[in-house]
Amino acid sequence: FGEVVCKSTAWDTAAARAQPDISLGDSLVMTSLRADHFHQGFTGLLEQLTIVGELSEEMYRARLTQLQNSVDALMFVIEDTNLQRIVGVGTLLIEHKFIHSAGRCGHIEDIVVDTSQRGRGLGKKMVTHLNEVARRTGCYKAILNCTKQ
C-alpha cells in the first residue's frame, strides 16, 4: 500500500459500487451485491461460512439499502451467470482512524466461496479485488483475519 493517506478521495465507495462487472471467465462475474442476489443462493452461501439465522427477503432488502447508502461498507459477489447463482462473497469495511493523518483502514471480511467452486482461486480473486478497492478508496492498509477452516 505504501503511505497512501486520503482524508477524502475522488474514487470513493460510490465509485467502487458503480464500476462495471469484472469477468472472471467461465460465465463468472464479480459485481456489487444486488437485490436479486437474494434469490440466487446468497444466504445459502453465507451459511457455508457461519450461522445466518432468520433473514427474510424484506430484512435482506433493508440491510442491502443500508449497505448501499453507507460510505464505509462494500459487498461484492461472484455470480455464475449461466446458473444464476452466487458462488462467492466478500465484504470491505472501512474504519476511520486518527493515526496516519486521519487515514482509513480497510477490513476484509466474510470471504466465502461455494464448496463446488473451491480450488479455482476465486477466493484469492475476491481478496485481491477488495484489497485494490481499499487502496483506491484511500486506505493505508487492509486487514484480513481468517479462521483455520
Image (tube, rainbow, N blue to C red):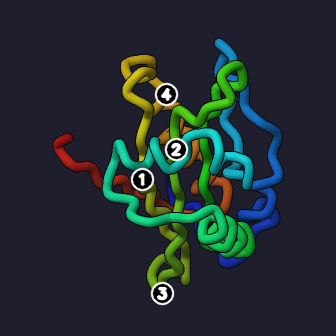
Q: Residue at x 58, y 36 (%)?
A: 86
Residue 139 visible in the current orientation = yes
Mark with earlier residue (1, 4): 1
Q: Count residues near mark 4 (Cα–Cα under 10 Å), then give few for <14, some for 14-19, many for 20+.
A: many
Q: Count residues near mark 3 (Cα–Cα under 10 Å), then give few for <14, some for 14-19, many for 20+.
A: few
User: In the image shown, does 140 or 28 lie closer to the viewer?
Assistant: 28
* Residue highlighted by disc 2: 89
Q: How many marks?
A: 4
* Residue highlighted by disc 1: 110
Residue 138 visible in the current orientation = no
* Residue highlighted by disc 3: 98
Secondary structure state at the residue bearing disc 4: helix
Of badges 2 and 4, the one in the foreground is 2
- Residue 75 % position (x, y): 60, 55
Mark with earlier residue (2, 4): 2
Q: Mark 1–mark 3 contact, CB under 8 Å? A: no
The picture quadrant where one finds residue 129 is top right
